[in-house]
Image: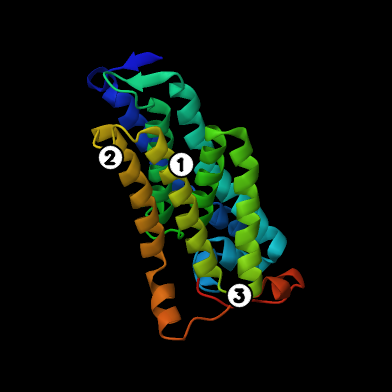
Amino acid sequence: MKELYLSGSWYYFLLMAVVCYFIGCFNFAMLIARSKHKDVRKIGSGNPGTMNMSREFGLKIGFLNFVLDAMKGGIPAVVGYLIFRGYVFAGTQVLVSDFARYLCGLFVVIGHIYPVTMRFHGGKGIASTLGLFWLSLGCENPWYFLIAFCGLWLIVLYIGLTEWGSMGSLFGVSAFSIWQGVEFFLRYSGTLSNGYVVCLFLFLLAINLLTWFAHRQNLVRLFAGEEHRTSIRKLSKGKRGTQNM
């Protein structure tokens, strides 16, 4: 393993953070809706995300939007991983690739939820976050890529059975975070107080806080018994589901 000194390469991480933020600012829902001469912010729930796109334009368009947002969250993380694969921070055994992929992912999610291009009112970050974990876990172990893919389908199944779209998505994000957190805990069990290791766990925590906070209105309605359900079965038949997500 080659050693990387943060003091001489900090600007690489700053550049990655800025680039990934602006990648996150690119909203595919807005682009797809505009191709259909509509403004997604003025239809349905007004949220430029997968669920609103599915209700307004059909499940196929919603799925396309999900895949694009997922790749937006996952690909920058994989690029960060590949660039710094084989490096450790000087004086530690902490993999720079671990730090880089979740730094990239975090700033994509921030850009998606708070895009400067949309006056800081973006989507809720679920698809981008799920894509981030899916591809990042795949970097850990090729088998994880397949297992995480199955996990995504379990989320879809949960939503299909319960019709609670927001809760299914949030539970999925939290489950993937715990999975990755356990991997980091086992890998760095002897150096958990190291600053870089602490940052890894803070990145995971921040990603969760951002997505849960973005769904705060959904959670308030849910606890008040006012949250509407989303039926994937109805959406697949071309009918509208209803939920503010």
The secondary structure type at the circle numbered 1 is helix
Residue identifier under label 2:
198
Residue located at (35% from left, 36% from top): 17
The secondary structure type at the circle numbered 2 is helix
Residue identifier under label 3:
163
* Label whose residue precedes the other's in the sequence (1 or 3): 1
Per the model, the C-alpha gap separating discs 1 and 2 is: 26 Å
Residue identifier under label 1:
23
Q: Are marks 1 and 2 in contact (CB under 8 Å)?
A: no
Residue 128 placement (x, y as % from top left): 51, 50
Residue located at (29% from left, 25% from top): 11
The secondary structure type at the circle numbered 3 is loop
Q: Are marks 2 and 3 in contact (CB under 8 Å)?
A: no
Quadrant that contains the N terminus: top left
Q: Does residue 52 lie above or below 195 as drawn?
A: below
Q: Nearer the viewer, residue 34 or 15?
A: 15
Q: Nearer the viewer, residue 164 or 117?
A: 164
Amino acid, disc 2: Val
Residue with the most extreme right position: 237
Per the model, the C-alpha gap separating discs 1 and 3 is: 31 Å
Quarter residue 34 falls in: bottom right
Per the model, the C-alpha gap separating discs 2 and 3 is: 36 Å
